[in-house]
Amino acid sequence: MNSDRLHAIATRYASLRVALVGDFCLDRYLEIDPARAEISIETGLAVHNIVSVRSQPGGAGTILNNLAALGVGEIWPVGFYGEDGEGYELRRALKAISGARLDHFIETPARRTFTYCKPLVLESGQSPRELNRLDSKNWTPTPETVSARLVAAVRALGDSVDAIILLDQVDVVATGVVTAGVLNEISALTKRRPELLILADSRRGLRDFPQIVYKMNRAELAALTGADAAADVAGVKAAVARLARKTGQRVFVTLSEEGIIGADASGAVEHVPSRPVRGKIDIVGAGDAVTANLAATLAAGAELREAMEIAMAAASSVVHQLGTTGTASVAQLHGMLIR
């Protein structure tokens, strides 16, 4: 990729309108100073003294952060948060992000705010060390009244945005934002606007999703298609090409340190390796950076391989940011891609 081509893609970001439909959560980091450790008089257990608390959007919010870092003009979160302190923090954090439009970000007493609480031990001269995470999730089905509001939001945005990203982050089906009603509305939208870029990623797999652009990892590809989860790059390329021809849509499969494979609707397939590691890494957020950059670049007119090269550069930038869920700006990507 040359500088002119990257510039041509990136200059289109400011005019893009992207809807981000998915499970937004609060990433709450508790920074622990081990030099202030105590023993509880009451229990005899170790006390971790927290010297700083920082919060940022996680889950779909990580994708939003990455879109904002690229300079995407309008980003429309479609999701929910609870009437709780975590929800207040999450909305405040989203409101502070350039380009975020919160008209369809729903507050509801029927849900609690999805939260990842991450204790981090900070020792001088060492990388942050994360302790056991404390998660707050919803374990019951999303009420129909909430789902109906989400469906209405997708319908309202569907005719005006340049791209839609779906992120299904929950562990238990039907407990998050991507409900059956939302998927039905997405399916209807594909018929109304067949040219619209809709990209989906789900940690539980994409089996029940409409035929849209799929982004997944090697294990999720195996679960969806029956492909060999241990297949080499050539085997994965063949499986991705078959799936793309079957769905008539682009398909992307990430391979961790082996990079990413993508195919277009004709089955033409590309492989872009990961970029070299430059010291210690933290892989949290790398997949969301790939999702954001694939969607933004494709919406901006990038070719398949161009989108994958930019996404791999973004992932490389993010994994080298320790103790946080990072992002990559256009300037950072330019420094990595153009030599």
Image (cartoon, rainbow, N blue to C red):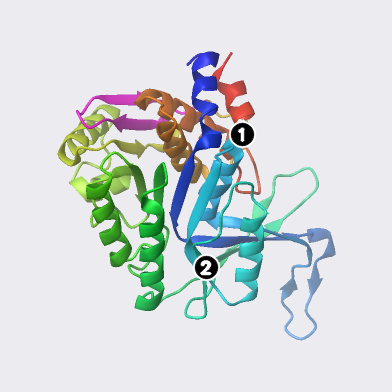
Question: Label 2, on which residue?
Answer: 114
Magenta stretch holds residue 259: yes
Magenta stretch holds residue 119: no
Nearest-to-viewer mark from 2 and 1: 1
Residue 87 percent across, percent down from the top left: 60, 70
For the point 78% across and 67% down, the residue is: 49
Q: Which residues are magenta?
A: 258-275
Name the disc covering residue 208, or none: none
For the point 42% across and 24% down, the residue is: 306
Residue 217 percent across, percent down from the top left: 35, 43
For the point 61% across and 63% down, the residue is: 91
Number of residues whose C-alpha sits closer than 10 Å to that of mark 2, classed few (under 14), some (14–19) or many (20 or more): many
Question: Label 1, on which residue?
Answer: 329
The amino acid pointed to by label 2 is Phe
Does 243 sit left or right of 6 as displayed? left
Helix, strand or loop status at disc 1: loop
Q: Note whether residue 38 is visible.
A: yes
Question: What separation in Å lies between label 2 and label 1 (alpha carbons)?
Answer: 27 Å
In the foreground, 124 or 112: 112
Comes first in the chain, label 2 or label 1: 2
Q: Contact (CB < 8 A) between labels 2 and 1? A: no
The amino acid pointed to by label 1 is Ser
Quarter of the rendering occupied by the C terminus: top right
For the point 32% across and 62% down, the residue is: 182
